[in-house]
Image (cartoon, rainbow, N blue to C red):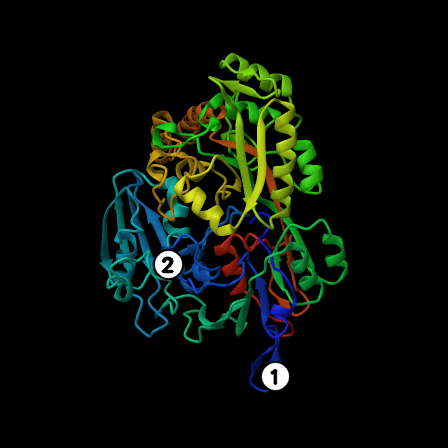
């Protein structure tokens, strides 16, 4: 999560942060802010674009937890072991035999088969899912799946067949009383918060140790900082330049590289995108006009790191950046170079100093989510920097819902957004999910919630290279495929790189123990990474227990 969309006032929360009772003792309820805005809408539907935080991970679980901070084997959840066939086209998974759904029904191999073959969650290349025995499932694919192991085992959720097979349109409802297998159950919901209660029948008898979790909805940065300082928020990842005062007040604090910050561009006119940004020359000019050094210093208080236009994570993924490919986006602006790119593409400056072509000026709207102050400030800085290069960008803000609707339907010109960092030291999942034709659709058509090609980018060379990379366990073959992808996207820039954001996470390590530390980063410490957040929460305990 970048800057989080945060809350307005303390009065809303004053009555909601009372401790939870546990027998004769009083145990503090852990209070989380994970980006929800007021009013809270009871949406625990995993097939909707915006289920409430906790739906994924606390209620519905994947088979394993993969730790992006480590190369160690994944931690078993609903699955206990897995193996690929030699050609990577078959994946056999061993399942736990002691799991029940929260309504008391047993979780069986049939639920796993259903989850992988259900219309809305079926992998596109899956041809068959069969039970080997009552605790083993075999998944068969048309193509090798070595590089998609996290998507299949670490992010694909398991659903109760007896519930979802009866629902005619799974995307329509809000699933207010979800039946899951996770460590928590939905408890209560109000306009400003919602709570989860521990699942006493959870398959891990030692977890969860925390009996109640409370998630707040907030609408403003300053209110969130006030709540942290007042001890009313125990766990959140937000951007604040005032982090030292919160640390001095007793909060635990961790900064980790977060997700890439980019300008989504609706890039593909053939799929209905409209605006100057559909021209690659305009996208390249904006790329060259951005002053990333100033943005890092002024909007992100020096916490961000450079981003590669190849979309590989610098440092971790350097081995996958092709020879001759640029390692990082330019940190300083070059308005002259931006102008040359536009002029070579047939643009000339009008009387207002703005480039135009065929009488149409390069004027664009750039939006970011209201309350994401680092992104809001970045938008204003890009507006100024682009103008110096003869490009008129008007930076504004909109609600989280408008952000989600815009990128899902493609009805935008520029959005300041983010891309999820891959859970493994390999950029394949970003290339597959954010760039391939299979993961996008025409403007006006709502993308599937699991599809992230918001730019509507479609390039057969990229599609073929992504398939080639997925078909091999040979690093040299994969690297050659990535080089082909990088040549295309560095030229086309459907996502214009800004920087790698930093996740500032604050956590109460006075009242609660079990948090990841620098010496034991057993999960990525950032609430916007919902599966990591959920895994951490189930591993916490009250201090002294």
Q: Where 247 sits versus 266, above or below?
A: below
Rendered image quadrant of residue 278: top left
Q: Nearer the viewer, mark 1 or mark 2?
A: 1
Query: How far across and down, in percent of the image, does residue 393 sit?
Result: 57, 31
Please say if 298 is above or below 80: above
Give the percent coordinates (x, y) of residue 176: 39, 67
Helix, strand or loop for disc 1: strand
Name the one closer to the observer, 304 or 62: 304
8 vs 535, left or right, is: right
Helix, strand or loop under label 2: strand
Q: Quadrant of the C terminus?
A: bottom right
Q: Nearer the viewer, residue 401 or 111?
A: 401
Closest to the observer, 42 or 367: 367
Residue holding disc 2: 79
Residue 438 figure quarter = top left
Q: Which label was assigned to residue 139?
A: none
The residue beneath circle 1 is 25
State the residue in front, 456 or 514. 456
Tell me which label, 1 or 2, sits earlier in the chain.
Answer: 1
Where residue 290 appears, as percent x and y from the top left, is: 62, 29
Residue 317 visible to the viewer? no
Q: Is residue 303 left or right of residue 321?
A: right
Residue projecting furthest to the bottom: 24
């Amino acid at each position: 999560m970048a800057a989080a969309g945060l809350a307005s006032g303390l009065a809303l929360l004053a009555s909601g942060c009372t401790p939870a009772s546990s027998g004769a003792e009083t145990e503090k309820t852990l209070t989380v802010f994970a980006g929800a805005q007021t009013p809270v809408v009871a949406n625990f539907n995993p097939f909707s674009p915006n289920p409430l935080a906790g739906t994924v991970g606390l209620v519905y679980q994947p088979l394993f937890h993969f730790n992006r901070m480590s190369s160690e084997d994944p931690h078993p959840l609903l699955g206990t072991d897995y193996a690929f066939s030699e050609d990577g086209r078959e994946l056999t998974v061993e399942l736990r035999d002691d799991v029940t759904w929260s309504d008391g029904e047993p979780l069986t191999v049939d639920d796993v088969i259903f989850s992988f073959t259900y219309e809305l969650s079926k992998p596109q290349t899956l041809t068959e899912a069969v039970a080997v025995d009552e605790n083993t499932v075999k998944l068969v694919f048309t193509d090798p799946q070595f590089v998609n192991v996290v998507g299949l085992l670490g992010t694909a959720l398991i659903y109760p067949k007896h519930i979802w097979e009866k629902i005619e349109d799974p995307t329509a409802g809000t699933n207010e009383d979800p039946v899951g297998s996770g460590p928590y159950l939905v408890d209560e919901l109000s306009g400003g918060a919602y709570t989860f209660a521990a699942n006493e029948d959870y398959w891990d008898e030692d977890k969860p140790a925390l009996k109640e979790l409370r998630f707040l909805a907030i609408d403003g940065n300053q209110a969130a900082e006030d709540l942290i300082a007042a001890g009313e928020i125990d766990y959140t990842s937000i951007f604040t330049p005032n982090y030292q005062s919160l640390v001095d007040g007793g909060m635990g604090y961790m900064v980790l590289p977060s997700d890439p910050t980019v300008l989504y561009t609706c890039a593909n006119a053939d799929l209905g995108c409209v605006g100057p940004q559909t021209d690659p020359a305009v996208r390249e000019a904006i790329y060259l006009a951005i002053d990333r050094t100033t943005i890092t210093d002024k909007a992100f208080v020096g916490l961000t790191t450079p981003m590669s236009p190849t979309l590989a994570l610098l440092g971790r993924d350097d081995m996958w950046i092709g020879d001759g490919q640029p390692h990082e986006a330019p940190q300083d602006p070059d308005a002259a170079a931006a102008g040359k790119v536009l002029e070579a593409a047939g643009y000339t400056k009008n009387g207002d100093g703005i480039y135009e072509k065929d009488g149409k000026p390069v004027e664009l709207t750039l939006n970011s989510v209201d309350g994401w102050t680092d992104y809001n400030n970045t938008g204003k800085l890009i507006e100024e920097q682009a103008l110096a290069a003869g490009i008129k960008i008007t930076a504004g803000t909109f609600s989280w819902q408008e952000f989600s609707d815009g990128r899902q339907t493609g009805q935008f010109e520029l959005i300041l957004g983010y891309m999820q960092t891959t859970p493994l030291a390999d950029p394949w999942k970003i290339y597959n999910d954010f760039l391939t034709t299979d993961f996008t659709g025409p403007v006006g058509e709502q993308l599937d919630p699991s599809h992230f090609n918001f730019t509507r980018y479609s390039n057969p060379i990229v599609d073929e290279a992504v398939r080639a990379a997925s078909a091999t366990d040979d690093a040299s073959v994969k690297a050659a495929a990535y080089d082909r992808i990088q040549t295309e996207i560095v030229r086309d820039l459907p996502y214009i790189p800004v920087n790698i954001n930093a996740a500032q996470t604050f956590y109460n390590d006075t009242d609660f123990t079990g948090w990841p530390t620098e010496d034991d980063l057993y999960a990525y410490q950032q609430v916007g990474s919902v599966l990591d957040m959920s895994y951490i929460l189930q591993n916490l305990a009250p201090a002294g227990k």
